């Protein structure tokens, strides 16, 4: 028998098998491929600071959480978390060295404080993406706590000014790009990356032609002033 990843020939006593709810579930693996396969997600349960690993071969949550790869294009994508035991109450992108880290840290600290106060069973799942500087932060609660969990999430967002556009600028588009898009599409009131991304999605394949048209129109109007 051979390892399903590296192809190494395996003796019976050397065989490991991929965990349930992983890409290599039930497939034979060598010791190195089983234990050293890079994690694609890390789960933290409540106050417990022990990281529970999910990789393509191991799932230390015993199936509480699973992940799957979602492709954006042939080169980019991200891992999406799922659970049949917990309910997703908030999700966010953690961007290294970006100002949004500050507000997400405040949100995380405060929501965990409230969840602990109310005795809510919760978990945080950090999943990888193709961008080494970006990972997803998913917050889950047990199904019976879903309603209260969602209410507390909205309460904390208000407390920490979570939705203020200043925290979510310059993630995809830099400041100059956002300013220009706001000038070219004044009716869209573009302030954040999300606004710009929604515009791109709305225009679809016509985005380049429409942008060129708007730029020419903007120049004509500026010249008349």
Image (tube, rainbow, N blue to C red):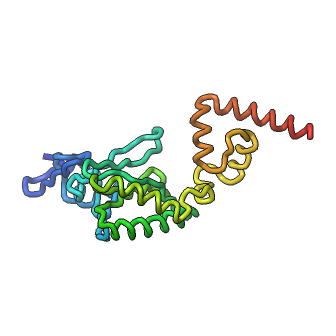
Q: Is residue 162 above or below residue 204?
A: below
Query: Left of 31 or right of it: where is 169?
Result: right
Q: Residue at point 23% right, 46% down?
A: 24
- Which residue in the rendered view is the most extreme toward the right? 224
Indicate whether 16 appears above or below 218. Answer: below
* Foreground residue among 175 and 19: 175
Farthest left residue in view? 12
Q: Is residue 122 visible?
A: yes
Q: Residue at x 23, y 60 (%)?
A: 35
Instruction: Please state which of residues 114 and 223 is positioned toward the viewer in this rendering.
Output: 114
Q: What residue is rendered at 43% in x and 58% in y?
A: 153
Q: Is residue 127 left or right of residue 191?
A: left
Q: 169 or 40: which is nearer to us?
A: 169
Left or right: 155 with respect to 15?
Answer: right
Image location of residue 100, percent across then percent down: 55, 61
Task: Say if residue 51 shows up in the picture.
Answer: no
Q: Is residue 195 left or right of residue 186?
A: left
How many labels sit on residues? 0
- Residue sitting nearer the eye, 206 or 8: 206
Residue at figure coordinates x 23%, y 59% from the top left: 60
Residue 39 position within the rendered picture, expressed as x and y whole percent measured from the top left: 32, 57
User: Where in the figure is residue 164, as x and y percent of width and height?
Assistant: 59, 58
Q: Residue 121, how many percent across, how many down?
A: 28, 62
């Amino acid at each position: 028998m051979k390892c399903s990843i590296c192809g190494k020939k395996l003796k019976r006593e050397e065989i490991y098998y991929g965990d349930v709810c992983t890409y290599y579930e039930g497939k034979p693996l060598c010791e190195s491929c089983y234990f050293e396969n890079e994690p694609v997600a890390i789960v933290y349960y409540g106050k417990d600071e022990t990281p529970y690993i999910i990789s393509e071969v191991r799932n230390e949550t015993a199936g509480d959480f699973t992940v799957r790869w979602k492709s954006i294009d042939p080169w980019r994508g991200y891992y999406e978390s799922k659970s049949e035991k917990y309910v997703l109450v908030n999700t966010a992108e953690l961007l290294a060295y970006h100002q949004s880290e500050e507000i997400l840290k405040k949100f995380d600290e405060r929501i965990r404080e409230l969840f602990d106060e109310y005795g809510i069973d919760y978990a945080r799942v950090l999943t990888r993406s193709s961008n080494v500087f970006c990972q997803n932060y998913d917050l889950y609660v047990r199904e019976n706590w879903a309603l209260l969990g969602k209410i507390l999430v909205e309460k904390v967002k208000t407390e920490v000014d979570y939705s203020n556009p200043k925290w979510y600028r310059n993630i995809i588009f830099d400041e100059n790009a956002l300013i220009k898009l706001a000038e070219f599409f004044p009716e869209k009131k573009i302030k954040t990356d999300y606004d710009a991304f929604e515009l791109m999605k709305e225009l679809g394949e016509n985005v380049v032609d429409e942008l060129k048209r708007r730029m020419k129109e903007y120049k004509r109007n500026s010249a008349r002033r």
